Image (tube, rainbow, N blue to C red):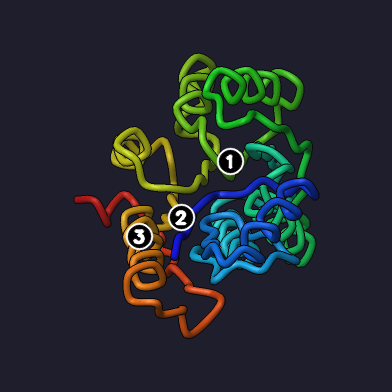
Amino acid sequence: MTGIGLLPIDDEQVRQKLNQLADKGIGVVTFNSKLDDINDLCFIGQDHYRGGRIAAGLMEKIVPQEGKIGVIISTKSLSCHQERLEGFRTRIEESIKNLTILEIRENEDRKEDAFRHTLDFLHKYPDINGIYIAGGGVPGVASALAIEKKENEIAFICHDRFPETEALLKKGVVDFVLDQNSTKQGYQVIKTLFNFVVKHKKPKSNFYDIPLDILTQDYLQ
């Protein structure tokens, strides 16, 4: 028996290919970004829609009434970012503070593009008071805020615990980090494939939920 673990893009050709592999008896395990209508063994990751809602709920608590927010996602080709965006947008619409999403930009996880988008947000919308980035490129946002001397004025929420996001959280530049525990996620992918290939055991559920941790400045002290 053989198996494959991958983070799939949301594309019909990818679906067809993965289903072809599954039909041949190859165990397919997807992680981080869920893909519907495929015969995978299971998906390992988080409820990203819920993650987006949590990010919006936190944003609601730290921006003022009539808050204006710029959003940066990696790409709409990954379902995890689509779901985070939809969760964030839905929760913002429900806010009692009458919050507004100014624009939604894509940066393909590149910090250079995140820098450029953030700088453009700051120049185009002088009254912006919140930035939510749903993927990579966090240092780019921080650099733009530093250049404009807005590090302590703009509410800033991001995902995933990396050394650079930890450093920004400790400095107070980032307000909240929503972590998806990539170490646990990677371990579970390998464990699931091992059980299938070596022990011939399929997972009991088609969704292994990785808990979401909310990190604050005090959490890292």
Q: Nearer the viewer, mark 2 or mark 3?
A: 3
Which amino acid, mark 1?
Ile
Residue located at (54% from left, 75% from top): 207
The 10 Å Cα crowd at callout 1, few under 14, some 14 to 19, many 20 or more, is many
Q: Is the C-beta separation of discs 2 and 1 under 8 Å?
A: no
Residue 178 numbered tag: 2
CA distance separating discs 1 and 3 = 29 Å
Residue located at (49% from left, 14% from top): 147
Q: In the rendered view, does 182 fall on the left or right side of 48? A: left
Disc 3: which residue = 190
Q: From this viewpoint, which residue is outermost toward the left? A: 221
Q: Is the C-beta separation of discs 1 and 3 under 8 Å?
A: no
Residue 51 percent location from the top left of the image: 57, 62
Earlier along the polypeptide chain: callout 2 or callout 1? Answer: 1
Q: In the rendered view, does 48 fall on the left or right side of 178? A: right
Q: Nearer the viewer, mark 1 or mark 3?
A: 3
Work out which quarter of the rendered image holds the N terminus and state it. bottom left
CA distance separating discs 2 and 3 = 23 Å
Which amino acid, mark 3?
Ile
Disc 1: which residue = 133
Q: Specify the quadrant of the image occupied by residue 186.
A: bottom left
Residue 204 percent location from the top left of the image: 47, 85
Q: Secondary structure at mark 2?
A: strand
Residue 102 percent location from the top left of the image: 78, 38
Residue 159 numbered tag: none
Residue located at (70% from left, 26% from top): 121
Q: From this viewpoint, which residue is outermost toward the top? A: 147
Q: Secondary structure at mark 3?
A: helix
